[in-house]
Each structure stands twice: as structure tokens, then as C-alpha cells.
Image (cartoon, rainbow, N blue to C red):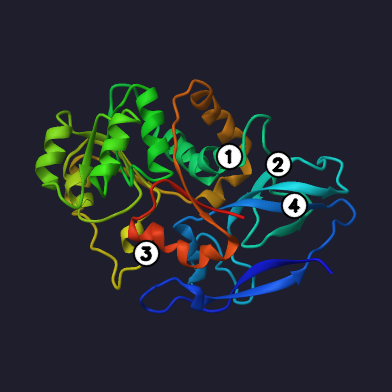
Amino acid sequence: MATHTEILLTQRPGEDKKIGKHLFDVVERETPSAGENQILVKQTYMSLDPAMLGWMVEDRESYIPPVELGEVMRSSGVGKVVESNHPDFAEGDLVMGMMGWREYLVSDGKGLNKLQQGIDEETALCVFGLPGLTATQGLMNIGKPQSGETLIVTGAAGSVGSIVGQIAKADGLRVIGVVGSDEKADWIVNELGFDGAINYKTDDLEARLTELTPDRIDLFFENTGGPIQHHIVNRLNEHARIVVCGMIADYQADEPAPGPNWMPLIKKRATIQGFAMPDHLHKASELVGQLAPYVQKGQIKYRSHIIEGLTSAMDGLNLLFEGKNTGKLMVKL
């Protein structure tokens, strides 16, 4: 009997929000077969994302229900169709979608998208997976950037922030990125073409921000939170837009950080909008269509941080919260 590995969430994170093997159970299951109008997918790459911590905790008011205890941990991934009884999929097709922490998946095809010819699994997850879709929806459809404006993006070396900055640069904006190391600052400026970088750990935040935004800030793409948020809000132009995508600095904090003073938001008549991708996944093909021209023109670069083996996910997810990943974090199965 052929078997495969699945990882189940069996415990909620405690008050410290720490992630590790103690939260999961690794089980062996009989490898399934595709039934009528179904496909069997062998997952090859699995995405690790900050949102996963939110999916683990008991938060019934979040934008998506938590993973129930005893269920396979939720994640997106890419895999190959190894058996098909479905008219829209053939053996050998590469598909992307929500697959979970497991080696094999039986699906009716809903929620899975076939990769275009010439797109490999790594590129798919780094660019056309959740990071690229999130960057495209948040920046282009919510932020609505205009050439000549100044954009600042936190988490700028991350999988979402780096794509946000590159799209904005391609569209003629001045782009400033906030990062957590000099190495990341060098990468976004000298490799990705950002106009400037702020190391939130070592720079004088107010002085550096003033230096890099002589025309102040029109668009703020927020991925992290943290002390620089207050300084950015104080540098806004009239009618600035703030797109709130993530708040990773607070995900494992005992208490959420206090928000910025609302007076500058009133004075500048700023618009703030939070968003979550489950609301927009139904238009994934449309978002890919918006993003694809930038990729085809060579305007989107990326780097990945790959860890090996399904079980490495249990501890590897911490790399995101410790700032130790050096690119889109994913597991190679």
C-alpha cells in the first residue's frame, strides 16, 4: 500500500504565539486515487506565508475561518497532475492553488489554475502565486498609483513588498522601501531599482524618511506595522492612500502596538483600506492578466528562500517572523 505524509494542526499557538512541532501531528495516509471528474495532484512546492499564524489561532471573526484542529494545515502550493479523470486537466499539467501541508491532493479542479507554458513552479509561487496576486490587488486596484507620486512600502524585501515596489517603479513612481537589514536595503536599491531604503533597525527613522521623501508621501503600502508607521503617517500628502496588507510586527506581540495619531489622517484627508486576498481570489485570472505584462517585460525580479522536505515547514515558518528569510519562503517537497 502506497502512503504519503500529511501534517495536521492539533494545537493552537499559546499566548507567546510561537510556532513549532508541538502544534502539529505528522501522519501517514494511504495515497488516494482520482475518482470520477477528479484529479490527483503531487505537490512539489508549498508556500509559507505570515497569514498562516492567523489561520492557526482561534479567531472566528477573522476574514477566513481558522484551520480546525485535526485538519490538514492550510497553505497554497504548486503540483503536478499525476492522474486525471477530469476533462479540463491532463496528466503532467502543473497546477497552483490551495493544497495544504500534504504530499498528494485529490481535487475536483475548483480553485486550481493551470500554469502557463514556460512558467516553472518556483516562479509561479514567487510571482504568480499569492504574493503577486496580493501585490497586484493591493497596489493597482486599491492604491491606484499615479506616475510621479511617492510610494513607501514596508516589508519591501518580502515576497509582496518587493513586487509592489517594482510595479510602482515601472509605472513611474518614486519608491522607498523599509527593510530590516543593510543586505536587504542593498538588494532593493541596487537590484530591484528602488529609489531608497530605510533600515528600521539602525537608521534614524524620522531623519532618513525626511531625506528620502522630499515631496512627502502619496501612497503607503503597509505590510509590517512597527514604529516607522507613525513617522510615515506624519509625512503624508493631502489625499494620500494607505493600503493595509499586513501587520507582521504585531502577529506574535503580547499586545498590539498603538496606532498612529489620527490627526494627520484628518488634516491630510487620507484614505485607509485594509484588504485580505480571500475576498479577491475569484478574480485570480484577472489579476494575473494585470501582472503578466510587467513580468513579460522583465520588470519583476524575485528571489526565493527554499527549505527542503514537508516536515521542515513546522519550524521553518518562524523564519518569516524572525526576519531571517531572504526571499519568498517555500518548501520543496
First in residue order: circle 1 vs circle 2? 2
Q: Secondary structure at mark 1?
A: helix
- x%, y% of residue 210? 12, 37
In the picture of the structure, the residue carrying the numbered disc 1 is 124
In the picture of the structure, the residue carrying the numbered disc 3 is 251
Instruction: Inspect the image, locate mark 1, and give the three-letter code of the amino acid beneath it.
Output: Ala
> Whole-Å distance between the Cαs marked 3 and 1?
27 Å
Q: Secondary structure at mark 3?
A: helix
Q: Quadrant of residue 183?
A: top left
Instruction: Inspect the image, locate mark 2, and give the three-letter code of the amino acid beneath it.
Output: Leu
Q: Which mark lies nearer to you, 3 or 1?
A: 1
In the picture of the structure, the residue carrying the numbered disc 4 is 41
Q: Which residue is pictured at 23% across the width and 63% down the height?
A: 258
Residue neighbourhood size for the residue with mark 2, other residues' Cα within 10 Å, grouped as few (<14), some (14–19), many (≥20): many
- Asked whether the residues under the numbered discs 3 and 1 touch, taking CB atoms below 8 Å apart as contact, a structural biologist would say no
Q: Which residue is pictured at 58% across the width and 33% down the height?
A: 288
Residue neighbourhood size for the residue with mark 4, other residues' Cα within 10 Å, grouped as few (<14), some (14–19), many (≥20): many
- Of 27 and 1, nearer the camera is 1
In the picture of the structure, the residue carrying the numbered disc 2 is 94
Q: Which residue is pictured at 43% across the width and 44% down the height?
A: 159
First in residue order: circle 3 vs circle 1? 1
First in residue order: circle 1 vs circle 4? 4
> Whole-Å distance between the Cαs marked 1 and 4?
16 Å
> Whole-Å distance between the Cαs marked 4 and 2?
9 Å
Q: Secondary structure at mark 2?
A: strand
- Asked whether the residues under the numbered discs 1 and 2 touch, taking CB atoms below 8 Å apart as contact, a structural biologist would say yes
Instruction: Inspect the image, locate mark 3, and give the three-letter code of the amino acid beneath it.
Output: Tyr
Q: Which mark lies nearer to you, 2 or 3?
A: 2
Specify the quadrant that holds the C terminus: bottom right
